[in-house]
């Protein structure tokens, strides 16, 4: 009997230790700013400029900006948790070629940005970068918002607080609580998750045409998470499932063409 109590005590100790680690270190597990710095000068995007934008949270963000030329339409792109503004360079190049203005958004604590990443600081940065575009004379309804992975959550939250044109969600999750329960079910208590990123809830406050893209072989964010989010949206929407698509290849596996078609379809503009 004594050995059984010792085993149970050890199991309880390990569980509580893991729980404390999850509570204290969860943002380290959630956000992965790249350690190496790669600036705009490392790309061929000669028409883009790095602009510093101050946020209401007290951070300064270096976004990449290409003002619109042929049209008044701008696409703002939000990257994933392990990327940076640099990683969207091929997306920016294509969108610029298609005639869009582009803003490559960045997050606090990431390259060329002060502060540290959290849901509060990232949303503040997203709103500040959106407002920067409006300050350039672009109407809010002419700004399309495109996010991938964590960036899809950022895009959704932004769209719930600003009157955007269109919303593109690539490999999104319904909420961070859902993801924690999926990956670490024994630690998946909603009250312990600091940055809940409840996209499903925020979609209720969005009024814009939405495109959802997801791969069936996504091992990071399962297709079922995107489906749950998509099903919860009551507004105008369309989906594009890429058979065999993973978490990182949707743009080059048909996503580029589908996103371009969606963004350029004037019949979808409200």
Image: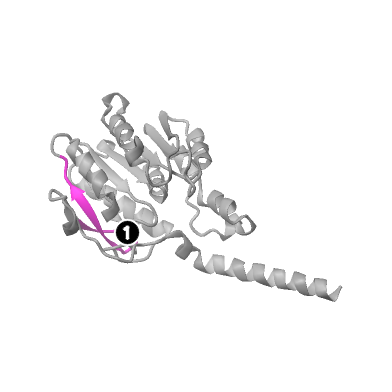
Q: Is residue 153 magenta?
A: no
Q: Residue at x 81, y 71 (%)?
A: 4
| Extreme residue toward the top, this view | 267
In the rendered image, the quadrant that contains the N terminus is bottom right
| Extreme residue toward the right, this view | 1
* Left or right: where 19 falls relative to 139: right
* Left or right: where 7 falls relative to 222: right
Residue 238 x %, y %: 41, 29
> Observer-nearest residue: 243 or 231?
243
Q: Residue at x 47, y 51 (%)?
A: 197
What is the magenta range? 51-68
Q: Residue at x 16, y 50 (%)?
A: 45
In the rendered image, the quadrant that contains the C terminus is top left
Does dot 1 land on a helix, a strand or a loop?
Answer: loop
Our reading of the magenta stretch's main secondary structure is strand
> Splitting the image into 4 quarters, where does residue 74 fall?
top left
> Observer-nearest residue: 133 or 77?
77
Q: Is residue 67 magenta?
A: yes
Can I make out residue 19 in this image? yes
Pointer 1: what residue? 56
> Splitting the image into 4 quarters, where does residue 254 fall?
top left
Rate crowding at label 1 as few (under 14), some (14 to 19) or many (20 or more) other CA atoms within 10 Å.
few
């Amino acid at each position: 009997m004594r050995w059984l109590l010792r085993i149970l005590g050890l199991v309880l100790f390990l569980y509580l230790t893991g729980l404390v680690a999850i509570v204290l270190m969860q943002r380290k597990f959630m956000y992965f700013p790249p350690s190496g710095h790669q600036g705009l000068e490392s790309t061929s995007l000669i028409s883009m400029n790095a602009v510093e934008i101050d946020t209401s949270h007290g951070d300064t963000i270096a976004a990449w900006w290409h003002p619109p030329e042929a049209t008044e339409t701008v696409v703002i792109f939000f990257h994933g948790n392990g990327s940076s503004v640099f990683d969207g360079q091929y997306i920016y190049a294509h969108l610029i070629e298609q005639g869009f203005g582009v803003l490559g958004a960045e997050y606090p604590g990431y390259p060329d940005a002060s502060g540290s990443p959290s849901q509060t600081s990232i949303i503040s940065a997203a709103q500040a970068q959106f407002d920067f575009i409006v300050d350039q004379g672009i109407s809010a309804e002419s700004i399309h918002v495109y996010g991938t992975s964590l960036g899809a959550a950022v895009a959704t939250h932004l769209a719930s607080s600003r009157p955007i044109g269109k919303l593109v969600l690539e490999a999104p999750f319904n909420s961070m609580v859902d993801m924690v329960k999926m990956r670490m079910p024994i630690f998946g208590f909603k009250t312990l998750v600091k940055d809940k990123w409840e996209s499903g809830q925020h979609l209720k406050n969005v009024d814009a045409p939405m495109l959802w893209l997801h791969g069936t072989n996504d091992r990071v964010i399962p297709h079922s998470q995107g489906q749950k989010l998509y099903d919860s949206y009551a507004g105008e929407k369309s989906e594009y499932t890429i058979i065999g698509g993973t978490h990182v290849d949707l743009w080059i596996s048909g996503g580029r063409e589908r996103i371009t078609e969606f963004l350029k379809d004037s019949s979808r503009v409200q």
